[in-house]
Amino acid sequence: MAKKKALITGINGQDGSYLTELLLEKDYEVGGIIRRTSKPNLTKIEHLLDKIKIYDGDLLDQGSIDRSILDFNPDEVYNLAAQSFVKTSWNQPILTGDVTGMGAVRVLEAIRNHKPDAKFYQASSSEMFGNTTDEFISEESPFMATSPYAIAKLYAHYMTQNYRDSYDLYACGGILFNHESPRRGIEFVTRKITYAVACVSQGVEQSKMGNELKEPLIQNGKFKLGFLGSSRDWGYAGDYVEAMWLMLQQDEPDDFVIATGRSATIEEFLEIAFDCVGIDNWKKYVGTDERFKRPSELKHLRGDASKAKKKLGWEPETSLEELVEMMIRSDVELVKKFELN
Ligand code: NAP
């Protein structure tokens, strides 16, 4: 029997790399769309390059998406590419709208025109719920997006539903709450914390890591964050990509919230991270900086994934403590290689 084929946009991102590993294990042929950058950034999928087919393409460029779909002829398409950093979306709202919002529609158009029987997964986000007051947020909760990123994701989510209803496409919106891993980008708060804590634990006073952050992460033995009181529902990316795949294996397309049901503040995350390296007076090493605060702060997110549990049989397997420990362990190794040599 011919192998199933999956095409992934954003294949070199955190989720793209875990999803590729999962699909290869399931004996899929995997293709990925990668945009051109002056300095190629394939570190997360370097170990997979001989097993996948790469297409040069960009969510801003309809022709390149069309050609990838026509050539690869996928059974499943996972749209994971996005301008995915909320803070940047205030500085680059037009780009964010174009890539994160319109980009999804370009992929949907390519499917509608060239491969209408392909199943489509859209990487929707819990940020779309914004400042909803529901204690546990489910598929029934109202959307109250508060950032250009969330608004762009909401547009893409509604268009996914619209293509499902209008053209009978098998299109799903996976509304994923925050999920992290050792492969999380360094500008995201969780990874910033685990890398900085790894530096502190190894006695690094001045970090060499600054390229992507545009300034050294650790200066004089301290690192700075934004608002510490925000709470998020954090899961492990490796668990969450399984839910993406499950959504495309059902009889009917649908939207699902994917979350752990536990919410913790950034302060609590810091405590767990410092605890992993045996340091209890963490406030000595952490400062706050107005520059890292968002113009409109989203204070609380906690998801209710009962629908996914009931219909997909999906449940998270990794606790927050296990996730933080995994990230710290990996970052300590990285710090030893990168900072101490
Ligand atoms: P990520 O690591 O930032 O990956 C995003 C990917 O999109 C990167 O590979 C990036 O390529 C690519 N990309 C950006 N602009 C592009 C463009 N114009 N054309 C083609 N590719 C482009 O994000 P992630 O954490 O894996 O998340 C995957 C998706 O889920 C994203 O859409 C994100 O918004 C969404 N999401 C994430 C979370 C979470 O907590 N992680 C939660 C809910 C939803 P470069 O490597 O070249 O930059």
Image: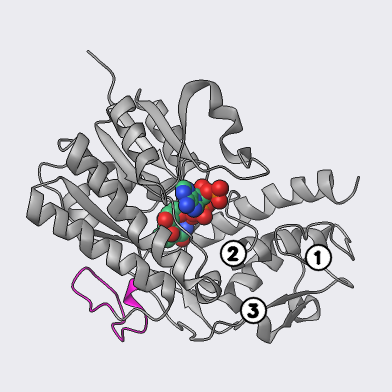
Q: Nearer the viewer, residue 323 or 240?
A: 240
Tag 1: Cα neighbours inside 10 Å, few (<14), some, or many (≥20)? Answer: some
Residue at 16% of width from left, 42% of height from top? 250
Label 2 within 8 A of ligand 1 by Cβ: yes
- Whether residue 218 sits left or right of residue 4 in the image: it is right
Quadrant of the snapshot with the C terminus: top right
Can you identify the residue that label 1 sits on?
216
- Amino acid under disc 3: Phe
| Cβ atoms under marks 2 and 1 closer than 8 Å | no
Distance Cα–Cα, label 2 vs label 1: 15 Å
- Specify the label residue 188 is tagged with: 2
Nearer-N-terminus badge (3/2):
2
Give the SS element for disc 3: helix
Q: Main secondary structure of the magenta part?
A: loop
The residue at 8%/55% (across/down) is 166
Q: Which residues are magenta?
A: 128-143
Residue type (three-letter) at the residue carrying disc 2: Phe
- Which residue is denoted by mark 3 in the rendering? 292
Number of disc labels: 3
Q: Is residue 69 left or right of residue 61?
A: left
